[in-house]
Image: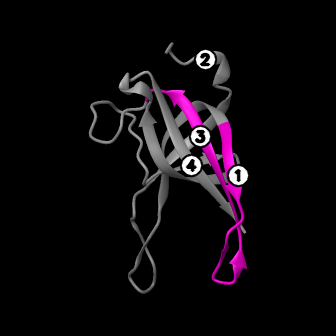
């Protein structure tokens, strides 16, 4: 497999991590998202569904964000990503569910993420 071709990386996304520093009035820790890294990606829609849960219908769409290599948590390097993070693409938010080092060659990273809308 060749390295990721720059021409296909046309979408700039923001990968955010939860610092967990915000607290509610009751003392509960609530998500507090900060920008971790900005990456150029190729965005590939994978699948969609409309589950019905707790009396409410919502839409769930799965995407793959393909980018140059991003080390996983624990790997040496300064731009790691993991499934506890999320992706912002314009006004849209995607929960990362998997981070894959394609062929374990440290050339290309695929982040699978889900967008949920009501």
Taking 28 as reference, is 8 left or right? right
Closer mark to the observer between disc 4 and disc 2: 4
Q: Residue at x 37, y 22 (%)?
A: 105
* Mark 3, residue position: 64
What's the mark number on residue 72? none
The magenta region covers: 44-69
Task: Say whether disc 1 or disc 4 marks the residue closer to the N-terminus.
Answer: 1
* Mark 2, residue position: 6
- Could you classify mark 4 by the number of other residues whose Cα lies within 10 Å: few (under 14), some (14-19), or many (20 or more)? many
What's the mark number on residue 113? 4
From this viewpoint, which residue is outermost toward the bottom? 26
Q: Residue at x 54, y 44 (%)?
A: 112
- Could you classify mark 1 by the number of other residues whose Cα lies within 10 Å: few (under 14), some (14-19), or many (20 or more)? few
- Could you classify mark 2 by the number of other residues whose Cα lies within 10 Å: few (under 14), some (14-19), or many (20 or more)? few
State the image quarter where residue 7 is shown: top right
Q: How many marks?
A: 4
């Amino acid at each position: 497999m060749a390295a990721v071709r720059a021409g296909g990386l046309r979408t700039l996304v923001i990968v955010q991590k939860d610092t967990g520093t915000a607290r509610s009035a009751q003392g509960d820790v609530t998500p507090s998202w900060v920008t971790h890294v900005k990456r150029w990606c190729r965005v590939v829609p994978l699948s969609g569904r409309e589950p019905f849960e707790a009396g409410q219908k919502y839409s769930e769409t799965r995407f793959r964000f393909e980018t140059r290599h991003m080390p996983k948590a624990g790997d040496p390097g300064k731009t790691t990503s993991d499934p506890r993070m999320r992706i912002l693409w314009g006004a849209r938010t995607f929960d990362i569910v998997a981070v894959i080092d394609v062929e374990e060659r440290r050339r290309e990273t695929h982040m699978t993420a889900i967008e949920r809308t009501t």
